[in-house]
Image (cartoon, rainbow, N blue to C red):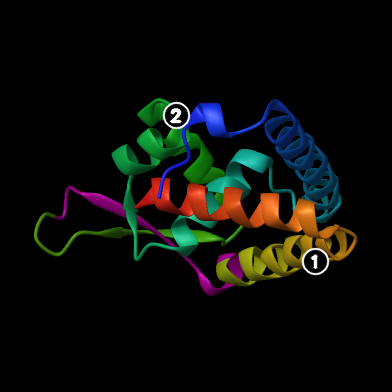
Amino acid sequence: MKTSPSKTSPIDTDRLADFVLFTQRSCILNLSGELSRGSVSFPQFFLLAYLSSEEYLTMSDIAKKMGHSTAAATGLVDRLEKLKYVERVHAAEDRRKIMVRITSKGTELVAHMRSEIATNLSDIMSEMDNDEADTFDHANRAIQAREV
């Protein structure tokens, strides 16, 4: 069931915006410390997160998902490949087509960071009152419905 904009109070949207900004800032600060140790930038980490949920992505897929040119996507992949977080493979049906897939080292990094983010969010959510938790739950369901 969709909620019309007129049924959403400005207070709810403001509270949700504050929640998103706070959690994003908190998670990004935690990511920053972790990622700087492994010489991985935020865009590179976001690419690894995409790759962790796919068998592989082509360079054009990566460029589209990242909002970059194919050349910029190639640069991201080059750096991640040097760090052994991803590997390039040739498509069986067309060896000219290059596919990128995450390595076990890359999967471990994403899993570790996801765990850190989940812990951070759990701590934040444990301090919510019932109204805040309901607002969060409603927003989460709405976001998931839009992704389908």
Q: Could you tell me which secondary element the residue under label 1 belongs to? A: helix
Q: Which residues are magenta?
A: 95-106
- Counting every numbered tag in the picture gives 2
Q: Residue at x 78, y 44 (%)?
A: 28
Residue that label 1 marks: 122
User: Quick check: 46 above or below 103?
Assistant: above
Name the foreground residue: 57 vs 21. 21
Residue 109, percent across and down? 66, 65
Q: Is residue 81 visible?
A: no
Residue 118, percent across and down? 73, 65
Residue that label 2 marks: 67
Q: Could you tell me which secondary element the residue under label 2 belongs to? A: loop
Q: Is residue 7 magenta?
A: no
Mark number, residue 92? none
Residue farthest to the right? 127
Q: Residue at x 80, y 68 (%)?
A: 119
Residue 59, percent across and down? 33, 42
Name the foreground residue: 16 vs 78. 16
Q: Is residue 96 magenta?
A: yes
First of labels 1, 2 by sequence position? 2
Q: Residue at x 63, y 72 (%)?
A: 108
Give the Cα distance between marks 1 and 2. Answer: 30 Å
